[in-house]
Image (cartoon, grey):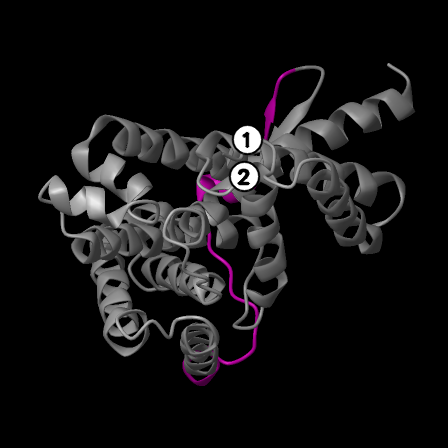
Amino acid sequence: MDASADLLINAVISGLLLGGFYAAVSIGVAISFGMLDIVNIAHPAVILLGSYVAFIGNTVFGIDPILSTVILAPAFYLLGMAAYQIYYVAFERRDDQSLRGLSFFFGILFIAEVGLILGFGVDYRSVQAWYTQGNLDLGVVELPWRLLVPFLLGLAMVAGLQVFLSRTFVGRAVQAVAQDQGALRLMAANPVKIKRIAFGLSFATAAVAGAALIIIQPVEPSIGREYIGRIFAICVLGGLGSFPGMVIAAVALGVIESLTATFFGPSWAPAVSFGVLLVTLAVRPNGILGR
């Protein structure tokens, strides 16, 4: 096979795998921002907390990084419910959730980052597992396990949540809560309780995505800033409230970034990906599968 063709194929495959990881880290924002209309810019901090949970579980207790975050996902779920309750009492109930509500999540982001710096310093931390090294050899291409496992984890999370949102009463209520709270009350559903559940889910999925992040690359407390713009861009590009659209956008962004980094250099990747976002929104303001 021609060297340039081989390079192209591997760049596309790496981009597809990266897209699965982007879907994993974007699920929480797809819920909080896309379905609840809450701009949770602290989302990357929750992802990083999940990364450090995976790090502690792996280095101190010898537990698999993904298993560590899955075990503690219920704790993150409760943390998310508590965060929404504070947000609701302090801002949403007073109809003051715009600028001050945004400041609340910025405060969480800042506190979490400072806490991680005080607790772990600014050194990069990584984990060890059988899938952090080596490749799956398929003959024509080799799939790095450190990208393949987060890809599969992201797809499993998206599929599971899609089933929950489409097949259960609570899931359908989550999708409807930002659109018609009056109708929800007529169906004996408390909008505040539904939002609390949804926000808990966004925190729990973010924690599990943190394990995917530390599998792909070493982490340090400020690395979450790199993902704020990218995560919200994926949700907007896919169409707010659309899980399938979010996955398509995540994969597209992953492939674009991989191709750009391979042929033009890594520094161009964010600029090109956000350029695609702007062009897409100019042509289709509601996103790929926006309602």
Label 1 belongs to which residue? 289
Asked if residue 123 is among those painted magenta in the image, a careful observer would answer yes
Q: Is residue 134 visible?
A: no
| Residue located at (50% from left, 81% from top) | 121
The residue identified by callout 2 is 239
Which residue is farthest bottom? Answer: 118
The residue drawn where x is 21% and y is 60% is 75
Judged left or right of residue 269, residue 187 is left
Alpha carbons under labels 1 and 2: distance apart: 5 Å
Where does residue 70 sit, x and y in percent of width and height?
A: 28, 48
Tell me if residue 233 can be seen: yes
Q: Give the residue type at disc 1.
A: Leu
Instruction: Name which quarter of the figure residue 254 lies in.
Output: top right
Label 2, residues with CA under 10 Å away: few <14, some 14-19, many ≥20: many
The answer to which of 150 and 255 lies nearer the viewer is 255
Q: Count the labels in the image.
A: 2
Q: Is residue 42 left or right of residue 204?
A: right
Q: Which mark is residue 40?
A: none
Mark 1 and mark 2 lie on one chain; the one further toward the N terminus is 2
In the image, taking residue 96 as reference, residue 200 lies left or right, namely left
Q: Position of residue 37 (x, y in %)?
A: 41, 55
Percent position of residue 5, x then y? 86, 21
Where residue 83 sits: x, y (%)?
28, 69
The residue nearer to you, when weighing 122 against 287, is 287
Q: Is residue 268 magenta?
A: no
- Look at 40% across and 63% down and name the residue there: 46
Assess whether mark 2 and mark 1 are in contact (beta carbons under 8 angstroms): yes
* Magenta stretch, residue numbers: 117-138
